[in-house]
Image (cartoon, rainbow, N blue to C red):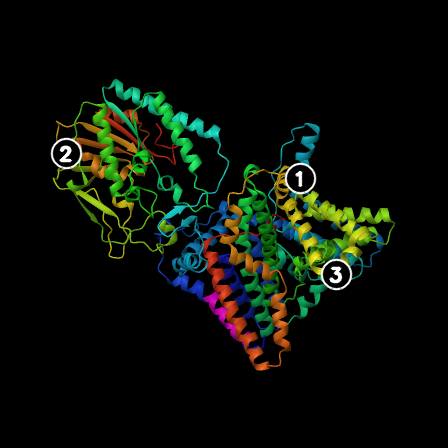
Amino acid sequence: MVFSSVIFLFLFLPATIAAYYIIPSRLRKLRNLVLLGASIVFYAYGGPKLLPLLLLSVLINYFAGILAGSDKGNTVRKASLIISVLFNIGMLFYYKYTDFFITNINGLTGLDIALKSIALPLGISFFTFQNLSYVIDVYRGRVSAQKNHFELALYITLFPKLLLGPIVRYQAIEPQLSARKSTPELFADGICRLIIGLGKKLLIANSMGIIADRVFSTDFSLLSCGLSWVGVAAYTLQIYFDFSGYSDMAIGIGKLFGFEFTENFNYPYIARSITDFWRRWHISLSTWFRDYVYIPLGGNRATKIKHIRNIMIVWLLTGFWHGAAWNFIVWGLYFGILLLIEKYFILKKLEKLPAFFQHLYAIFFIMLGWVIFRSDSIAQIWDMLRALLGLSHATDNGQALFYIKEYKAELFVAVLASTPLAKFIGNRLELSTRKKAAGIIKNYGAIIFLSCVFLLSIVYLIKSTYNSFLYFKF
Amino acid sequence: MKKSGSIVLSILFLLAIFFVPICTKLQANATYSFFENRTLANAPVLNLQSLLSGEYFSSWNTYLADHMCYREKLLANYISINMNVLKKTVVNDTVVQNDMLLPYYVQTVLDYNTINNNIGNLADSLDNVNDYVEKMGSTFLFVGMPEQSSLFADKQPNDCYSKKDYFDYVEKSLFDQLDSRSIDYVDMKKVFSGCDDYQKYYSTIDHHYNYYGALKTYQTILEKLEAITADKFDILQENDMDISAVNYPAVGSRSIKLYNLYPTDEKVYIGYPKVKVPFTRVDNDKDEVDDLFTMPYYSTSYASYTIYMGGDKGKTVISTNRPDKPTVLIWGDSFTNALETIMYYNFDKAIYLDFRHITDGSTIYDYLDEYKPHIVICVSNDTVYAVQNDNVP
């Protein structure tokens, strides 16, 4: 079930809100059970036959957490950690990567091993990482193991973040499981985030997706330089608004039930370097890799060779996490190399340049990265890069200009919304001496704006009965 | 946001998300969408397989989306926003021009292998039919019609792909093949393009020709038949007809995608010969129909190309009880419909076939054996010359 669907917005969500709030707030555990039930229904919507896997995952990690945080000696604690890691990684490997390895083994050896065509459980990349972070944090003594299996199940399966993140650490959510408070302000803030996320997805991402899909499916012989740049720019905007839109909705829906999740994006396209970009993009994933792979490997507190090794391992895994295909691995390694070049050679020099050039540098390499990410094959990466450099010899048939003119409104809004302009306006209103006027604009102006975005989003939602998120295949 | 604002926003949001499902439940259950020309989804039926696969739940999303209250209004709003506010050139895959609607084509590299293969198959099929018909002592004629976007390819905006290269290639390929096999044909695109007022013959909101285009096609076919046979036909001219506009707003295959929000004063025309020829009409061997035009039922209805013969039929036989006149058999897709309302006039019997709607496995040869027509005509349009379809024997 996706958030931007009729069934979620007009059946599941109102039913869950009603079932949750009909219970008095003092019966917190019952409210948690309602959320747990709703989360299970949410997951089962995609096919109940994969539900047992999720529940098994909850069970294994529950016991692993108990043992990892017990006082039964280091051997038991370590064994339970290893079992949890093997189980979670093994599950991820089996469901997501089996056919990738079979295909490559067949290619290298000439064998003809049959592909397994295993159905990928939705959200597996997200909830396995979440499970791992829980057990590892318990082992490290950062959090106490959750003894109540329903509470742990709620943490793992909580539907706002179950399928596409953010990857929420147990540390952040533990106090909220037992002592969160819903207030009108928090509820309204949740609505605000939900509507903004909906608008990002339905009004911007989907429109940019039309351009990107068309350009990326254009034959190389017809792909002019201008058209390829328009397509890459469109995809750059599509993926940001699609994924950040989802994160906004997840955070917003969490707030409706009193949960505060960590932010996942911080205006990544205003980054001044690739280093800066990765502090702003998919923050929950990059911090996960930092805390559970990079730092345990030694991080930057190692020899130069080992540091380089650590960076490349993290980025190889980051790329591989995104998809079982070579282009994702290349994408990860691409950013690993760029980060190393910045770290060891150019970052300090970059910081001395005017901000405009820093932004230009960053957005250029970010966009090239998206070419690698979006392409269906290594061959297509090569074709797209050549087209971007004007090496396709395709004549411009007006398509590039057509897309810019046709989608000028969406492009304009997308570029503005990629910047913290709204936040800037909000802050100015906060600081304004005309408190009454600022208050009216902030309160009622926001309501009018959100109502328009919501209404427009519903119009666009009905236009297509189904909208899927780009990161859904993870 | 202040507490008061938070409360207002929360109430509005909750009202919206609760109102929609309640309103949807209370409204009458529509089964068909006129503008989408499809049956709306039924409520899913629960069974173990659909439950386990997730299809049961996802079908509920489709059902709710199809039956959501104010759905048609919301879709119309989407069209209106895109056409009138965002002023998009392309809305719902339709190129919106001031004077007409055209389809939006995405440019692809032409697959010449497949095109040549399919045209070759069509030419072979027509050749076989031609031989069979000639052995019967009858005459075969192929009529190639341009689809609206083909005839008006030059009307596409400069930055939209007109598909002219495709249309030119398939037309030349097919007609070269027909020439090489000595199959008689009429290239109606050439005929229409040669007219100064060629726009008169085609709809601006539909992919078909209009009644005037059908009349012109009828005239051209009979003139060609006169040239290749010894027969003389009393060919109807415009002033032999009572042509009138149907007094309902017109809707076409293009404008329906825009929820008929595209401003047009186009009308659907029908015509009756001033000198009437009584006829009987039987559809699909069982339905007797007393007219060649099917008028809209309600005062709020639209008039469309389905007025002609009531739309596509598998088989229609029109008998005029004039045994001194020849029999004609015409097969093809919807491009025959308007033509069928006139072609019967010069024949004792006119048999019209559309193999997309013939499901008993009968072939053209079965009908040729059954009716032994003097004239056999195949009508096709250039969007399907190079596409495998049921009307290729």
Chain holding disc 2: B
Q: How packed is label 3: few (under 14 Cα within 10 Å), some, or many (20 or more)?
A: many
Give the main secondary structure of the magenta stretch. Answer: helix
Q: Is residue B142 visible to us here?
A: yes
Residue receiving disc 2: B320
Which residue is situated farthest in the right direction here?
A303
Can residue A276 be found in the magenta stretch? Answer: no
From the viewer's perspective, is B345 left or right of A388?
left
* Quadrant of the image occupied by residue B325: top left
Q: Position of residue A118 (x, y in %)?
A: 61, 41
Q: Is residue A4 visible to us here?
A: no
Q: Position of residue B172 (x, y in %)?
A: 39, 29
From the viewer's perspective, is A159 left or right of A109?
left
Quadrant location of the N terminus of chain B? bottom right
Disc 2 to disc 1, how far (Cα)?
A: 71 Å
Residue receiving disc 1: A98
Of tags 1 and 3, the one toward the viewer is: 1
Chain holding disc 3: A
The reply to whether the C-beta atoms of the residues labelled 3 and 2 are less than 8 Å apart is no
The reply to whether the C-beta atoms of the residues labelled 2 and 1 are less than 8 Å apart is no
Q: Position of residue A466 (x, y in %)?
A: 50, 52
Disc 3 to disc 2, how far (Cα)?
A: 91 Å
Stretch in magenta: B5-18
Of tags 2 and 1, the one toward the viewer is: 2
**Earlier sequence position, callout 1 versus callout 3:** 1
| Label drawn at residue A145 | 3
The reply to whether the C-beta atoms of the residues labelled 1 and 3 are less than 8 Å apart is no
